[in-house]
Every structure is written in structure tokens, then in C-alpha cells.
Amino acid sequence: MSSFIIEGGTRLSGEIIPQGAKNEALQILCAVLLTAEPVTIHKIPDIRDVNKLIELLAELGVEVKYLGNESYRFCAKDVDIDYLETEDFRKKASSLRGSIMILGPLLARFGKGKISKPGGDKIGRRRLDTHFIGFQKLGARFLYEAETGMYHIDASQLKGTYMLLDEASVTGTANILMAAVMAEGKTTIYNAACEPYLQQLSKMLNRMGAKITGIGSNLLHIEGVESLKGTEHTMLPDMIEIGSFIGMAAMTQSEITIKDCQIPELGVIPETFRRLGIQMEFRGDDIFIPAQERYEIETFIDGSIMTIADAIWPGLTPDLLSIVLVVATQAKGTVLVHQKMFESRLFFVDKLIDMGAQIILCDPHRATVIGLNRQQKLKGIRMTSPDIRAGQALLIAALSAEGRSIIDNVEQIDRGYQHIDTRLKALGAKIERVD
Ligand SMILES: CC(=O)N[C@H]1[C@@H](OP(=O)(O)OP(=O)(O)OC[C@H]2O[C@@H](n3ccc(=O)[nH]c3=O)[C@H](O)[C@@H]2O)O[C@H](CO)[C@@H](O)[C@@H]1O
Ligand SMILES: C=C(OP(=O)(O)O)C(=O)O
């Protein structure tokens, strides 16, 4: 396990280019299984979870060719479905969350699929009911084998139908959508998730010959087709990384330009950071954040304390709440951070409290942050990264803190942030990776 040693308190400056979106990449990579023709994908981030999924696809028999400059070509002409029976598959699939999305494509193209309980962040219960109920509605049989912990699905012919999802699950919607594109007849998915990740996936599937309408809404209509062809796709910049960099600039009083953000795709993210008092300027498609001595959290119109909560898209993604929380620790004012979706994602605040932050963890879902208004700096400490976004939040805290911090288990951060130490060093951060 590697660690970061960070000497905090240095102002950063310069330009940074966001990586391709992690959670989009995981969907798009699974979609290559839907066709025997080549699929070329650009702006694939070089991060642990994505690399693990690419490795898994290669083991499944997908031809993988790195074309350079973050582009890959995949060809799923000779898929070795027997690989699903191996212990190696079980282990690899359970090491990340995104692997669950191979099921929809495998079911659509080969009539069966199986997977072990997928991994991902330990941030509370992460149920998969929506995925399997959706497959069942399309006519698949589902079996959970408790002794092996494997989920099995199979179907001789998927049939389009109407379904109302019990929750707007991001990976669940992607999985069902990828199964439905080759089902017989029409499928309607209501209460579908509609994050930019899903919009990008839907557009890619349409370029492959699928017939999906309603993209960007929570009501998707899919007319099944017999087969799909190859295509080319470019990932959006990672909106979670962009949000993290906005927060990092404010916390470290740095002037930073985040390049090529595809601002219209960011939804409420910039506005959320503005509500914390962070100034930013849109310069073409770049976001410029000036060095700010202080920033002040807004109140609601009636003067009551600001709440920042997650919500399904187009609400604020839960993946940015840890960053919002850490940034608030140095703001002027108070904010209630309400993590509605996950019940174990706020426990990392203990470490921020050890660093000197004023936070009251009200319950597993809510934390009140009383900003220090820079009257007191956070102090560097040794800590462990519990999950990907808390890890990045702690890294931001450490960069702004007085003295040295050590963050252990940075593999958590590497799951989602590409070469983060090297890229932050280029902005002037004092950060070293040690093994
Ligand atoms: C690989 C990937 O893409 N992971 C993302 C994906 O995970 P993932 O697809 O696993 O998350 P889901 O969208 O299924 O659900 C997230 C959580 O929110 C709850 N929930 C969801 C929808 C709803 O209408 N009501 C509700 O309460 C679920 O019970 C669950 O606890 O989406 C999450 C929610 O944006 C993100 O945090 C993850 O980073
Ligand atoms: C929770 C996340 O990832 P995963 O779903 O892969 O665990 C995340 O990206 O913030």
C-alpha cells in the first residue's frame, strides 16, 4: 500500500486538464461487449478501476489495443464466455463496482451472464435489486447462489416491456439499457437515471445502431434491434474531478484554470461551489478560479443555514459532497451537508476534526460544518483514505494544512484520480508518493 507525504500550506497555480470521466468510462467499456465490430474510445482515464475493467475485458477475450494518447480500440469478436466460470473472473470482477455492467451486454449478446458481488467503495449498503428486477422484467431468469456469492442470469430471448424502476440507479439503468437495446420489441424505462454518463452511453449506443429516445430524461424508450455495429466515442471530462479542483483551489487560496470542462454538462456543480462563496469565471470552456483570501457560505433567502444535499441528476451528485464538506471547513459561515444516498460516507469527518476542523456529525447522513474563516489553519496529521472521494477530500485538507500530513492507502484515491500526485506537483504542490 502506498502513501502520500504532503507538506501543506503551499499555494498552487497554473492550468490543469481534467481526466476522462471515471463513471462514464466504466459504462462505455462494458458496452464494447455488445458488438463484434471494433469500437474506438478516446480520453480513457488511466486510473485503477478503469484499468482493472480493461484487464477483465481482455481476459474475456476482447481484443484490446492501446492507440496512444488515452485512446483504445476494442473488438469483442471472440468472447470467451467460459471465462465467467473461473476463479480468476470471480476475483477480478469483485474488485470494482463497474464490473456489474458487463451483465447487461452479456445477457443481450450471449443470453447469459454471471458475476460475483461487485466491489467499489464501502460507503453504505449498495443494493443491486434494480439491476436484476430490470433483467427479470425483460424475461431473464435470475438466481443468487448464496454459497458462492454469485449472481446468475440467463434468457433465451429478451422481450421489450414497460418498467418503472424502484430507484433511479446509475449503474442499474446502464445495465438494463444495454440489455434492452437488443431485446425483441419496445422497452420503456421510467424513473431512469439520467446523469451525463447515461446520456453519453445512450448516444454511443445509438451510433452503434440502437434506437433510444428520451435521452437526458427519466423516461427512456428503446426499440430493440437485432445487432449493433462498431463506433467511436470520446469521454466527457470528469465532472467530479472538476468539482474537486474547484474546491482544492479555494481551500489552498490558489489561482487555477481548469481547462476544457464542457461546462454545460456540469449541471449544478459550479453553482454549488458558488454557494460556498467560491468565485469562478467561465472563460470559454475553461473555469478560472482566482486566489481568494476568504470565501463566505451563503444563507438561504430567509437567512436560515445553507443545506447542501445530494440528489439524483440533475441534482448534486453524492460523489462531490465530501469535497463540499472539506471546503466548508475554511469558509466563513455554516453549512449542513446532507448525504441522503449513502449512510457511511461521512465518517471520514473524524479525521478533519483531528486536523482542527469544526464539524458536528449529527447522524450518519448529516454533518454541520462551522467554517473557521481561516482564523485557524488545519494541522497536518497521519490518516488513511477510507474511500475514493473522502480520500481526495483529505488530500485537499492536507494541501491546505499547516505542516506535514501522511495519507495511507492512496490506492483508494488512485481508483478515480489519474496520476494525481504528478499533476498536483505540476501546480506546485509538495506531495511525494512512497511505497
Ligand atoms: C461506478 C459508478 O457509476 N458509481 C456511481 C453510481 O453508483 P451506483 O450505480 O452503484 O449507485 P446507485 O445509483 O445504484 O445508488 C446509489 C445510492 O443511492 C440510493 N438511491 C439511488 C437512487 C434513488 O432514486 N434513490 C436512492 O436512494 C441507492 O439506494 C444507493 O444507496 O452512482 C452513485 C450515485 O450517483 C455514485 O455515488 C457512484 O459513484
Ligand atoms: C462511489 C464511487 O465509486 P464506485 O461506485 O466505483 O465505488 C465514486 O466514484 O465516487
Image (cartoon, rainbow, N blue to C red):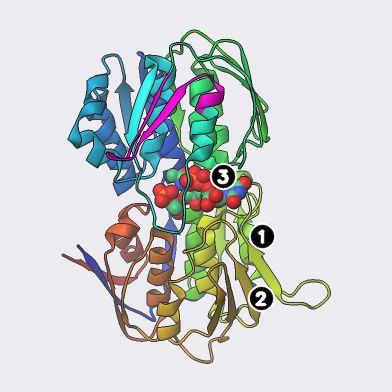
Give the Cα distance between marks 2 and 1: 12 Å
Q: Which amino acid type is shown beneath numbered disc 2? A: Ile
State the separation of the CA atoms marked 3 and 1: 15 Å
Residue 297 numbered mark, or none: 2
Q: Amino acid at mark 1?
A: Glu
Residue 418 in sight from this viewpoint: yes
Q: Would you say the residues marked 2 and 1 are in contact, meaning their CB atoms lie under 8 Å apart?
A: no
What secondary structure is found at the residue carrying circle 3?
loop
The residue positioned 55% from the left and 10% from the top of the image is 184
Which amino acid, mark 3? Gln
Residue displayed at 60% across by 11% down: 185
Q: Residue at x 54, y 16 (%)?
A: 210
Residue 278 visible to an observer of this rendering:
no
Element type at mark 2 = loop
Left or right position of 196 against 382: right
Q: Nearer the viewer, residue 417 or 162?
A: 162
Q: Nearer the viewer, residue 120 or 63?
A: 120
> Which residue in the structure is indicated by mark 1?
271
Q: Position of residue 348 (x, y in %)?
A: 43, 72
Instruction: Please report the residue visible at 60 percent of the width from the left and 44 percent of the height from the top.
Output: 265
Q: Which residue is mark 3?
A: 262
- Check mark 3 vs ligand 1: CB closer than 8 Å? yes or no: no
Question: Reading the chain from its start, which is encountered first: label 2 or label 1?
Answer: 1
Q: Report the magenta residues as a range.
A: 135-154
Q: Earlier in the sequence, mark 3 or mark 1?
A: 3
Expressed as whole percent of the image width and height from the top left, the position of residue 68 reads 28, 34
